[in-house]
Amino acid sequence: MRLPLDFSSPLILLLASLASFCCTGDQDSRSFRGKIRFEEIQEDRAFDLVGASWGLATGDFDNDGWMDLYSSNHGSKPSLFRNLGDRFVDVTALILGSGRGDFHGAAWADFDNDGDQDLLQLVGAGRGQGHGSNRLMVNRSGRLKDEAAERGVDDPLGRGRTPLWLDWNGDGRLDALISNAPRQEAPSRLLLGGDDYFMFNDSTPLQPFNSQHAGMFLLGKRLVTIVFGKPAPQLFQQSSPSRLSTARALDIPMPSDWAVVDLDGNGQLDLILTKGSGTPVVSEVGQRQLQAHLPLVGEEMVIEFATPGPVTFELKPASRRWWRPDHVWIGSRGSHPSRMQFTLRNEKAAGHPTVPVEESKSIEIHYDSDTLTWRVAARAQDHEVLNLIVKSEALIERVQVYGFSPNVAGGWIRYFSGPSFRDRTEQALLSEIRGCGSIGAGDFDNDGDIDLYLVCSYSGMNRPNILLENSGRGSFKPVTDAGHAAGSNDGTGDRVVVIDFDRDGLLDLVVANGGGLRPFNNGPLQLFRNRGVGNHWLEIELHGTQSNRDGIGTRLHLDTDRGRQIRLAGAGMHAGSQDQSTIHFGLGRANAARLTIEWPSGATQRMSSVPVDKVIHVRESSPTKSLHQARAPGALE
């Protein structure tokens, strides 16, 4: 049998909602509303990279005005791509050096206020059973040197996930919030930046807390930090220059990813959350290969199939911390293979194995001569993941599963209106979306409101990504084929970052398809260029003087004759991803703008008649001397 794939049901429901938009009310007069349209830039001008990702970060490491890209490449060597304006080139060997690791999220920032971008790469610790030191790649004239140990950021026992740069104590120097997955001896921690060294702030209540990622948010005019972790996401605020205090636990679910943006145009920041699938996948690759991704916790999962054999099994991930040969029980003798890739003939696997009850996890494989079928049964008391590949020289037929429903998109998307966190998911027409684990938020058509791009997949198989256009009032309609950015069929959708890579005022997308574990993470890194519509735009690069140099924590209000927009400079961070730090506004047809900037230092700058269709540089100083057009990329100061 062919297993049904539930690719269409969420999209059908979304497309049904499209009809309610096409013929109701008058068109928003703020802007020209055309189709959002992307084109994929091919490998010779983008990224010749396939495989595990788990982290993307944009930053201008060489200070030439073009945003470069870093990819963590989990379990392998990371990659660094220099942006030449019309294409990217791999400069890993020249700039970054080598070294493999359990790499997760990373973030660029000028933490030492010396005028160039440094990189903080968080490193896991082998599922909490080993160690792995974080990397703080300090920019030395365009070369990156790891100084994590010397500066107190290495945290070798921490299961690092995603960093957040912020100026917690308001001293003009960036601090680092290190999100660590659960491990008793290495919780998440706040590190306060000094002249040469980061100081572990052991007085904060983060110490018994574990988290995956964190971001900044505004409650009215108050800047706070939301930490997404267990047992529930929590909101923290500053109670003194050196101490963190919990404001409250939030009644919101734990997401895979999130964005902080004003979705309904009311001048208040909202919180959009998305949760990936996390459900089992079973697929037939041709007629002689079967693949399965099984997230195990408690209940047994069984796959049966018919083929005369011999059959080759490949079980992953295979390591002392995951699955070992002694976890595999074959036939009535209960024999174990010598390694995790092996070939069996029918007679060698005949009969049902007996697994001792004290085994915490097991994989049973046997052949039933009465029904002429093979049976694979996997179970685990605690959370485990099993990736299975089955190959046969003959046809694989009559595939059946028991104990689970495969290929059904799980997860959700939720929209909470700030600052009260009122759930507006249904009003926004988002409640039927499933299985999308990463979110990119930006005004992709420059019409003055925030659109959403979702990276979607099953746990071990790609699905088409979704692009949602904002109606202007905080409700959304899908764009056909995600505006030609539906993504690859290969790999598993992982991350997206938003970047105006060619500085034309149109937000582009970089999408990683290396999510999950082998063999399902063998997908490409893709670049989608925005071909755009004819609306105006403005981009702003911040330069703090009293505040931190990157202006992280700055609030920006932009007014035109069509209304007000708000942005929070949060260094572009979301889960495992860093969008460009350059602030982008779509202006629709407005050809003039007024800008108010509220710096972390407390300084406020107001600027009238700001030019449009420009990248401008704003220096924290007197308003009359602080605004100029950013230098042309590649030009000297």
Image: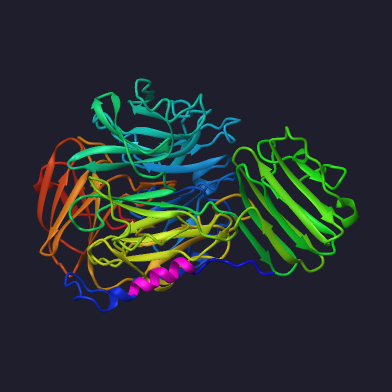
Q: Position of residue 170 (x, y in %)?
A: 23, 31
Question: Mainly helix, strand or loop, the magenta region?
Answer: helix
From which residue to which does the magenta span run? 9-18
Extreme front residue here?
Answer: 370
Q: Let me know if residue 17 is in the magenta part.
A: yes
Task: Evaluate whether residue 30 shows in this view.
Answer: yes
Looking at the picture, tell me which residue is in the foreground, 121 or 246: 246
Q: Let me know if residue 372 is in the magenta part.
A: no
Q: Is residue 149 left or right of residue 196?
A: right
Looking at the picture, tell me which residue is in the foreground, 505 or 24: 24
The residue positioned 24% from the left and 49% from the top of the image is: 269
Q: Is residue 372 left or right of residue 134?
A: right
Q: Position of residue 26 (x, y in %)?
A: 18, 76
Relative to 628, is 214 above or below?
Answer: above
Q: How many marks?
A: 0
Q: Position of residue 327 (x, y in %)?
A: 75, 40
Task: Evaluate whether residue 140 shows in this view.
Answer: no
Q: Position of residue 603 (x, y in %)?
A: 13, 38
Q: Is residue 630 left or right of residue 519?
A: left
Looking at the picture, tell me which residue is in the foreground, 296 or 264: 296
| Residue 454 figure quarter | bottom left
> Split into 4 quadrants, where in the image is the N terminus?
bottom right
